Image (cartoon, grey):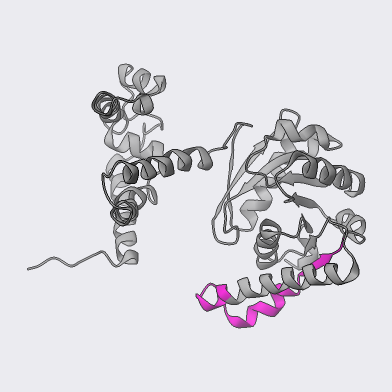
């Protein structure tokens, strides 16, 4: 497919997120314009442009250096990235099929940005915010028409992490959500759709994990180095193959329930109280692989083949980490 046949992208905001998104789409063959929405004098505008394009070049050089592509790909990819100053923004926005907003995380900055995007974007263009803190329902009122707006939360570094959390608002057109999902899947990303809820999915999960790791240091349970080693070779290792809910089903929801009760009593805190769905599933006999039903449905599945497949993935990961050893005979 020629570049001209792919969607044209605008990254509104010339900061870290906009630059990362520019790398992602240019790498995947799309024309991208990095749009600086802040009015600047000539010298300052030129400095920001040179800084942004220089960082994008450095990122591509780094990706080539670690084997993600050949060095000969750097210039063709970079040629797909354009830079627009605030004066050039209206024309750049009017050309875009999809616009990702990445201005600072203040309501004033968002409101000003969306007024500009709404005024100059084509009627059929998708407008998506990359915010990690503001809900799509809150921001949707700043966009005209609101049906074309939703949140698209990228995880840094955007050019490496596959996941993008898609959070439509109450007024978002379903076709808009599907168009964005299709676009992201087409460039090799893994979009997940979630309701407009504080923290989306990953930030909620990782905040609990990071806070608990800090508490372990605070309580003197282990050193930071030992906790990070445990995270990489135990906690993170397993969740690189199994999803969190899949992992509950693998071991059994009943085990989680009883572990939660023990830690709640032993540590004297309600941080480990099991949510009602865990108890409900256990009482209904939906404890995972043992009963072929848990958070996921395993009915009709060859469970033995499924387990072998997951274990093979673990072995592959062990080899990648240099932690696999042959048997001693």
Residue 303 placement, left or right of 297: left
Give how far across and how far down residue 269 sits, in percent. Answer: 33, 25
Q: Residue at x 40, y 36 (%)?
A: 245
Q: Residue at x 40, y 19 (%)?
A: 276
Magenta-tinted stretch: 62-85
Farthest residue to the bottom: give it. 72
314 over 174 or under it: above or below: below
Foreground residue among 153 and 134: 134
Figure label count: 0
Looking at the rendering, which quadrant does residue 213 occupy?
Answer: top left
Foreground residue among 14 and 60: 14
59 over 157 or under it: above or below: below
Farthest residue to the left: give it. 329
Looking at the rendering, which quadrant does residue 128 occupy?
Answer: top right
Quadrant in which the N terminus is drawn: bottom right
Foreground residue among 191 and 61: 61
Quadrant in which the C terminus is drawn: bottom left
Give how far across and how far down residue 270 sits, in percent. Answer: 36, 24
15 over 144 or under it: above or below: below
Give how far across and how far down residue 78 sits, in percent. Answer: 72, 74
Q: Is residue 84 magenta?
A: yes
Q: Is residue 245 magenta?
A: no
Foreground residue among 28 and 301: 28
Residue 299 placement, left or right of 144: left
Give how far across and how far down residue 326 sits, in percent. Answer: 17, 67
Q: Residue at x 56, y 77 (%)?
A: 64
């Amino acid at each position: 497919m020629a570049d001209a046949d792919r969607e044209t992208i605008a990254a509104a905001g010339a900061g870290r997120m906009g630059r990362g998104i520019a790398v992602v789409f240019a790498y995947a063959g799309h024309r991208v314009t990095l749009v600086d929405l802040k009015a600047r004098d000539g010298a300052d505008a030129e400095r920001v442009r040179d800084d942004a394009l220089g960082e994008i070049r450095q990122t591509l050089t780094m990706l080539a250096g670690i084997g993600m592509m050949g060095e000969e790909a750097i210039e063709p990819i970079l040629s797909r990235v354009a830079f627009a100053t605030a004066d050039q923004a209206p024309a750049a926005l009017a050309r875009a099929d999809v616009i990702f907003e990445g201005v600072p995380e203040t309501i004033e900055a968002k409101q000003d940005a969306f007024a500009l995007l709404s005024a100059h974007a084509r009627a059929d263009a998708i407008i998506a915010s990359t915010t990690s803190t503001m809900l799509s329902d809150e921001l949707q009122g700043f966009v005209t028409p609101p049906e074309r707006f939703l949140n698209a939360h990228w995880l840094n570094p955007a050019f490496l992490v596959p996941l993008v959390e898609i959070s439509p608002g109450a007024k978002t057109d379903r076709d808009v959500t599907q168009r964005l999902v299709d676009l992201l899947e087409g460039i090799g990303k893994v979009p997940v759709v979630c309701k407009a809820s504080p923290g989306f999915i990953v930030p909620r999960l990782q905040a609990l994990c990071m806070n608990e790791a800090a508490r372990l240091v605070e309580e003197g349970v282990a050193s930071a180095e030992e906790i990070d080693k445990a995270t990489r070779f135990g906690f993170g290792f397993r969740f690189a193959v199994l999803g969190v809910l899949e992992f509950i089903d693998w071991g059994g929801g009943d085990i989680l329930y009883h572990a939660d009760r023990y830690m709640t009593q032993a540590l004297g805190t309600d941080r480990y109280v099991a949510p009602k769905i865990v108890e409900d599933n256990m009482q209904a006999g939906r404890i995972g692989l043992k009963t072929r039903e848990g958070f996921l449905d395993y009915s009709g599945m060859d469970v033995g083949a499924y387990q072998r497949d997951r274990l093979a993935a673990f072995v592959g990961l062990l080899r990648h980490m240099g932690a696999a050893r042959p048997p001693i005979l």
